[in-house]
Amino acid sequence: MNVLDRLKENFDEVEQALSKQEAVEESNRCLYCYDAPCITACPTGIDIPSFIQKISSDNVYGSARTIMEANPVGASCARVCPTEELCEGACVLNHSTTPIMIGKLQRYATDWAKHNEKVLFKRGRPIDRSIGIIGGGPAGLSCARELAVQGYEVTIYEANEEAGGLDTYGIVSFRLPKAVSRWEVEQVEQLGVDIQTNCKVGEDVSFNEIQSKHDSIVLAIGMGEVPNLHLHGETLEGVHDAIQLVKSTKKDDLPEPLVGKRGVVIGAGNTAIDGATCAIRLGAEQVQILYRRTSEEMTAYDFEYEFAKQDGVEFRWLTMPTRIHGNDQGKVTSIECVKMALQEPGEDGRRRVQPIEGSNFTIEVDFVIKAIGQNRYIDLLNEIGIDHVNGVVRVEEGRFSTSLENVYACGDVTFGEGHGEAMVVTAAEQGKQTAYRIHEHLQGQARTFA
Amino acid sequence: MADLMTNVGGITSPNPFWLASAPPTNSGYQVQRAFEAGWGGAVWKTLGDPIINTTSRFAAVSYNGQRVAGFNNIELITDRPLEVNLKEIYETKKRFPDHAIIASLMMEPKRERWHELVKRVEQVGVDGLELNFGCPHGMAERGMGSASGQVPELVEKQTYWVKEVATTPVIVKLTPNITDITATAEAAVRGGADSISLINTINSLAGVDIHTWNTIPNVDGKGAHGGYCGPAVKPIALNMVAECARNENVNVPISGIGGISNWQDAVEFMLMGASGVQVCTQAMHHGFRIVEDMIEGLNLYLDEKGLSSVSELTGQSVKKYSNWGDLNLNHQIVAEINNDVCINCNKCHIACEDTAHQCIDMLNDEDGNPILRVREEECVGCNLCSIVCPVDGAINMVEKLNDRPPMSWNERERVIQSLTVSKSS
């Protein structure tokens, strides 16, 4: 087996699926609570006891339908949801034995539907209204699915080669294989939703043109690339953007391997973990995560942190990069850092950090991966002329309406500045809710015109 | 350690655990393995005229992933020649002289044929005979097994014929496929039975394959009713044992059979009147080794209860088994929810709300935490909530004292009647 084929195996899904017997046994353990707390804990409100009960009665088709009805990206969420903080964390069995493996059962049912090529939903009786959705990620797909089920004409404008957004490009393959996200996209396409790929608003099509074609517009563009570090040496060869790196591993062919190379990741969120574990799986010899605070302040989920440690990723806390050095060929060779000291908590409650003078040191590296958050599409928002705060589109709470008439927004583009949570499952729910608000609005109009 | 020595109508064994007449006791090899494992006795698979068995023969019922909750078979009596069985019984008895070997017998209802079989079998040194009047399938169509076991006269007559020649104790095994099992139990006693054993298997069809629409089990696409046993039948068997035990005309020892899976089940059967027990399905599910825990568990239980002999258990609960009309209507219990233990699955609420008496409320305490509370005045003490509760100790059924004296339905009727009589006189 050649190196590339071997590395490719590193990107196979890590978590094993439940066998039929395991799934049935686990489903039989569910108490089938009444007014179950797991349902309340699920942002999309999946009727979890019901889908689990359907697994136990071998009605897996119905089970998948129950899941996907509430969550159009339920197969992805089965894999990426922080279940211990959501449904499984709320399971009453936490108080007596061990919680039900809800995520794994959800995966079992949706995998079954995918494997058996089941059609889960049908388009509703056609309504002569058209909705344009900008962005085919979890929020956009979810919104499109609900509108199409109602019977609306829906077009999704997707900048990438494929729809699915974060699920397709932003989550590492070994956690969420692309085929899963692709299946969810197909489910939406089957409802007659027109997905225009490679169609970037502002470049391939203007916002005005979209506006002229549709009765309502949904802005679900998510977030952009990793911002600049504003460090010397940032443009050297070997400095990567974590999001771009993850995206490159989700193409049919892997990017250039990092076999035998050493590098660092800057940042300690979930994206930093993704960047680090991708680098390891591309063959890197050593990967260190540099973070200026400590594990306490780190934003990555606990299970992500554990996963990275098991992959052999090293963590250097209280370490801030100050400069990236390169050689004559413009390739990165080392990174200079300074040690930090923890201070009292600031206004946001997080402890501040202060560089320790004279503590500078250098790490020799072949690559540097940036993972310090994501940029916003501020230019596009300004061009559209929509109200936003630092790229976070302002929406009316619960209505998803924006400063522009008939323009709605949901998902990560509305997340931040103290609003919402950046989870796939939250985006999916917002997409659904946006669809309902649009439907209410257009129905009202229809009555007026009649 | 208590004395586990057991005597069932004159048949003694080192402990009360016998293997029932069934596939586990088909051969000397098996019975000897069972005795090595610790079983106190074995009722040899029924001897009689030659038969031919079908494939397949068994089926089981799973419930929510629990395998063999119930078990069904269409196997007949032994399909090995009588002389082979007798030779192996002789050899086994020689190796295990202290263990009980009982020969199960089935014969067409003819006196001379019964005589002939009993004599041949007793020659090899069995400790007793068990007359199979219970097998519900195959043999019944030929007038044997449950076909004769359902007719009290036939039970009495055949028992009598056997007793005419038998020199060892005779157990009559009863079929549950009858409206009132005490009718045949009494008939067995009238015929001279030294003890009775019950229950045999219950008429059953284990299932239908919803994909092929075949019966379960099926033989080349066709099925026939079988005999049901295993954990699912225990309550039915326990009731029948108790009904016999409290019937004053059934004054012989009882060998309890039906879904006995562990020492606790055995204790229950003995408390309800059994002198010993017979086991089959549990052994078929897990092998003979299960008897080790049965013996140890029973021993420790007897020690804990301060009993020196297992025989002291027999019948202790029989006097507590009564008729509905004798139950105290003024006794009151209510559900009490322990919210410290409760995990808030709300199963008690929905069970009560939808299917019982609508008296468990879902509320919040002062801190806003969800709690469940019983409205005692509405609670009828039906037990349903505590039955569906998945956590031990979360719901207790507690006695609610009242100032009403005990009063059963029968007492109430008597009082009403006496009032009516005094009025009319």
Image (cartoon, grey):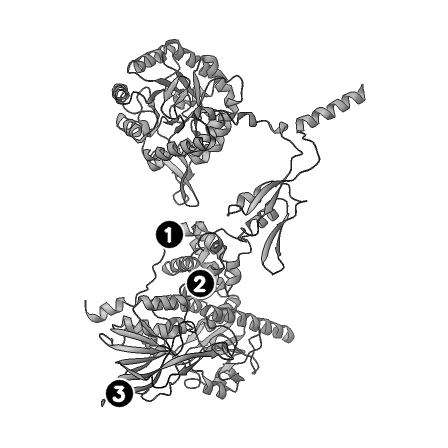
Q: For the N terminus of chain B, which image quadrant? A: top left
Q: Amino acid at mark 2?
A: Thr
**Considering only order in the chain, which callout, 3 or 2, is on the residue closer to the N terminus?**
2
Q: Chain of mark 1?
A: A
Residue annotated with mark 2: A83
Residue annotated with mark 1: A22
Q: Position of residue A350 (x, y in %)?
A: 47, 76
* Circle 1 or circle 3, nearest the eye: 3
Asked if badge 2 and badge 1 are on a common chain, one would say yes
Distance (Cα) linking label 2 and label 3: 42 Å
**Considering only order in the chain, which callout, 1 or 2, is on the residue closer to the N terminus?**
1
Q: Residue furthest bottom?
A: A328
Q: Residues within 10 Å of mark 1 (few under 14, many from 20)?
A: few
Q: Position of residue A170 (x, y in %)?
A: 38, 74
Q: Residues within 10 Å of mark 2 (few under 14, many from 20)?
A: many
Q: In this rendering, does residue B389 appear at all?
A: yes
* Circle 2 or circle 3, nearest the eye: 3
Q: Position of residue A148 (x, y in %)?
A: 50, 69
Helix, strand, or loop for circle 1? helix
* Circle 2 or circle 1, nearest the eye: 2
Q: Residue at x 45, y 20 (%)?
A: B253
Relative to A414, residue B297 above or below: above
Quadrant hosting residue B116 = top left
Q: Residue furthest left?
A: A1
Distance (Cα) linking label 1 and label 3: 53 Å
Report the front residue among A173 and B373: B373
Residue annotated with mark 3: A326
Q: Amino acid at mark 1?
A: Glu
**Considering only order in the chain, which callout, 3 or 1, is on the residue closer to the N terminus?**
1
Q: Which mark is residue B156?
A: none
Q: Amino acid at mark 3?
A: Gly
